Structures are given as C-alpha cells and as structure tokens.
Image: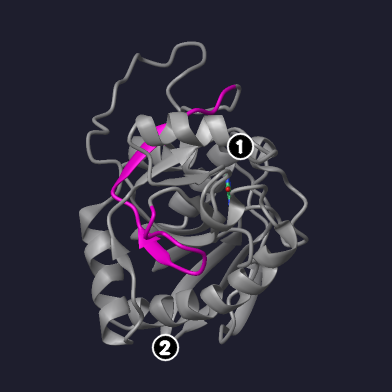
Amino acid sequence: MLAILGGSGLSQLANLENVRRQAVRTPYGEPSGPLTFGRLSGRDVVFLARHGYGHTIVPHDVNYRANVWALHAQGVEGIVSVASVGGIREEFRPGCLVIPDQILDYTWGRSHTFFDGPGVKVTHIDFTMPYSQTLRTRLLLAADSCGEAVFDGGVYATTQGPRLETAAAINRLEHDGADLVGMTGMPEASLARELELDYAAVTVVANHAAGRGGSMNGIQLELIEAVLDDAIRRVRRIIEAMVSQ
Ligand code: HPA
C-alpha cells in the first residue's frame, strides 16, 4: 500500500473508493488529521493532508514526526509527497511538475529526528541521496504512461516560511544550487529515511520564486490557486497511474 502526503492544493484524493478515515495516535503526538484509507485504481492507498483537511496547519507547525510515524505504522511501501514550490531554475515555470532528486534544508526549530531523547542511542543515517530512486522511477514511468510531462531531477530548498522569500534570499538559494523552493520538504524526507521508508516527491511549481520571471516585482498570490488547480489534476493522473503499475 502506498501513502500519499498531500500539500497545498491536494487536501483530498478524487476517485478514492471505499473511503474510511481513522485517527491514529503516535508517540510523537497527533498527525495532521485522521488517515484516509481507500482504493484508487483498484489498489489500497492511504492519504494524509499535510496541512490538515481544512488547510490550517502552517509549515513550521506540521507535526512531521507524527505524520511520518503514523504512515509508517500502517506498513506502507513508501510515501509520495505532493508539495507546491516556487521555481528558481528558469525552465521551472508555474504549472511545471518536477520530481526532485536533492534537497537543502534552511528550516529551524522543527522536531526533525526520531533519534533523540533520554536513552536513545546516537544514530546517524546516510542521506546522500535523499529521495528513493525506486519511487522516483515509478513516478517518472507513471507520468510517461499517462502522457504528463515532468522534469526528472532538481534541488529542492526548504525554507521556514510561512512568509515567502526575498529576492536576495532566492539569489542565495540559487547560488547554493537550489532549483525549487518550498516549506515542507524537510524534515519530512529525513524522517522517512530514519524509518527506512521509501520517500519521493512530486513538486508543483505554483509561482516563479521571488524576484524571478513573473515574480520580478512580487509574487502574485492570487494567481497561484488557478495554477495549482490545473497542475494538481495532472498530479492525480500520475498518482493513479503509479498505484496501478
Ligand atoms: N517559496 C516557498 N514556498 C513556496 C513557494 C515559494 O515561492 N511557492 C509555493 N510554495
């Protein structure tokens, strides 16, 4: 069974059948909401809305540990994250879908590891390749099979939010090697790795990053919803193709 962690624009999966919701407690507190179990393209999936079903949880307040733990506890084969981002690399224009292959972390103050607390052994994980290549390949094949264009690879920079960045911050991120900027990629990805759970992301470019392209003089927030609506439709098709592989 695959887990889908939906972000802005994806607070539920359409076409989900036999839907059942279940509240789950974890040693780390409550996830963002009850888990939604159902069948998609004839296969079992579990879905969780990262920001809550009413989209009320800001990126730095998401209980990433509880979310990842709760999904892992269902015995899922992996997590596919759907997340909206700003595009830094020139070809990553609004509406593009990108399957990132690397990640940078500029967040702070988030509970970012399972390996702390009294009596917990010091444990380091390998995180050289932060995304599961197996899941990335499945996503790329699924996109191909339903004729949806996606970019293969990109460096996702995770900022603290909830405010968007300054133009100078985006210049710095680009200088650091970032192609995309979002607020939720970390610590989600490393927590999944700590539990040895496959994790990959489909990112939806909602806007040009601050100071770039159409956001040269500011990010037009009112345009984002329409971009996401259309792009999320394509993400749903890819996920449906992926689960039926
Ligand atoms: N910056 C950070 N996070 C985002 C953006 C952005 O420009 N767009 C969507 N999520």
| 19 shown above or below 22 | below
Instruction: Residue 66: give x, y in percent of width and height.
Output: 58, 41
Helix, strand or loop for disc 2 = loop
Ranked by sequence position, the earlier of labels 2 and 1 is: 2
Q: Residue at x 58, y 58 (%)?
A: 214
- Residue 7 shown in magenta: no
Q: Residue at x 36, y 39 (%)?
A: 103
Ligand 1 within 8 Å of disc 1? The answer is yes
Helix, strand or loop for disc 1 = loop
To which residue does mark 2 refer?
42
Q: Quadrant of residue 147?
A: bottom left
Looking at numbered disc 1 in the image, what kind of residue is underneath it? Glu
To which residue does mark 1 refer?
165
| 94 shown above or below 245 | above
- Magenta range is 90-108
Instruction: Residue 52: give x, y in percent of width and height.
Output: 71, 55
